[in-house]
Amino acid sequence: MDRARFEHLLDAYGADFRRWPANERVPAEAFMRENAQVLAPLLDTAGALDAKLDLARSSPSPSAGLISRIVAAAPRARAAPRRTNYAPAGWALAACTLLGVLIGYSGGALAAPSADQDDYFAAAFEAPPTMIDTGDPG
Amino acid sequence: MREGLRLMIDPDAETVRLAGAGDVRAAETLVRRHLPKMVGLARRMLNDGAEAEDVAQEVFLRVWREAPKWRPGAAKFETWMHRVAINLCYDRMRRRREKADPDAGMEMADPAPLAGEVWLAQQRAAAVNAALAALPERQRAALALVHFQEMTNIAAAEALEISVEALESLLARGRRAMRAALADVAQDLIDDADGASRG
């Protein structure tokens, strides 16, 4: 911190070091202590302007009506849709599926075509000998 | 000049998230926390109480629009709100210039009879606000944010979308102009008050 830097910051931020950049406050206070006599008039001038500006610091509180209007315009959570309970139907579906699989598995094994059945199907496509028209009347 | 390491912990982040999800209590918390600052800033920028409330309301309408999709990012929520407010004020000042309304931004102290001290305080505040209103708008905004809103230099620079160096230049020029403007005005008011009390 040197005098030029100190004056630059004083011109910008005023006499209250709390408004100064955080990383400049400690060096500025040290520089101020070391050069109090020279810098005091500059700080007084800046402090006088701060005080004048502070004459306009107070501001009327926002009206209750304004607060209500703004809050009324805030987003509202939508009511959650009614949840239908699908659990019993789900269990029933799962049970049916399982039953079907089990029946299919076991029934399939029982219904596996046997050699006899092959013969039966083969016979179904053969005309019985009695129905063969030989052209012989009799 | 930049501050080195900066923690980006946004004290509003959770409240904004809740408000965006429709939590009315969170929305009211945000309003009570920030509305006075928004009105105060707009009032200093526009020097008009009614317009300041309009601007503050518009800021919050934008907050409600943005809150559901708000993600903590480079700037704090409060800094973003200040930026929105400043830009809305710039818009209104531009419209005033286009309309060339000579009375705009010339808010006077309440004319109702008041006790001497209260009257004097109002006159002084009106004088300071009138001097602020006469500043170029960017200088006015810089002073409003740093002196009255007490924002850090980095937050104020972010709100104005300028560098810290540019902010310091605006502040220095604004303070110089205010010193010149208030040198006479404040003393006149003090003399008036002394005269009134003697009379």
Image (tube, coloured by chain):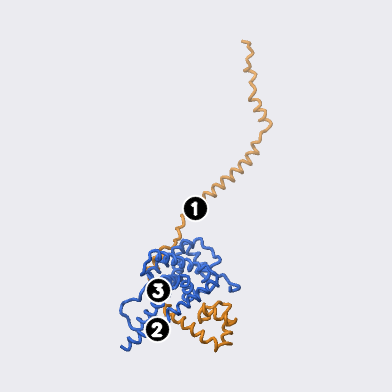
Chain colours: A orange, B blue
Query: What is the spatial separation of the Cα atoms under label 1 and label 2, in whole angstroms?
Result: 78 Å
Question: How far across and down, in percent of the image, does residue A78 sit?
Answer: 45, 58
Between marks 3 and 1, how big is the CA–CA gap? 51 Å
Name the quadrant of the C terminus of chain A.
Answer: top right
Nearer to us in this view, B20 or A56: A56
Type of amino acid under label 2: Gln
Quadrant into which the N terminus of chain A falls: bottom right
Badge 1: how crowded within 10 Å, few (<14), some, or many (20+)? few
Which numbered disc covers residue A61? 3
The residue lying furthest to the top in this view is A137
Residue type at mark 3: give it: Ser
Label 1 sits on a secondary structure element that is loop
Tell me, yes or no, whether dots 3 and 2 are on the same chain: no
Cα–Cα gap, marks 3 and 2: 28 Å
Mark 1 and mark 2 residues within 8 Å of each other at the beta carbon: no
- Res. B83 visible in picture: yes
Q: Which residue is label 1 attached to?
A: A85
- State which quadrant residue B191 falls in: bottom left
Q: Does residue B32 appear in this view?
A: no
Instruction: Using the rendered view, name the quadrant where residue A121 is placed.
Output: top right
Q: Are marks 3 and 2 in contact (CB under 8 Å)?
A: no
Residue to which mark 2 is pinned: B187
* Badge 3 and badge 1 both on one subunit: yes
In this rendering, the label closer to the viewer, 3 or 1: 3
Which amino acid type corresponds to the residue marked 1 in the rendered image?
Answer: Asn
> Dot 2 falls on which chain?
B
Mark seen at residue A57: none
How many C-alpha atoms fall within 10 Å of the one at disc 2: few (<14), some, or many (≥20)? few
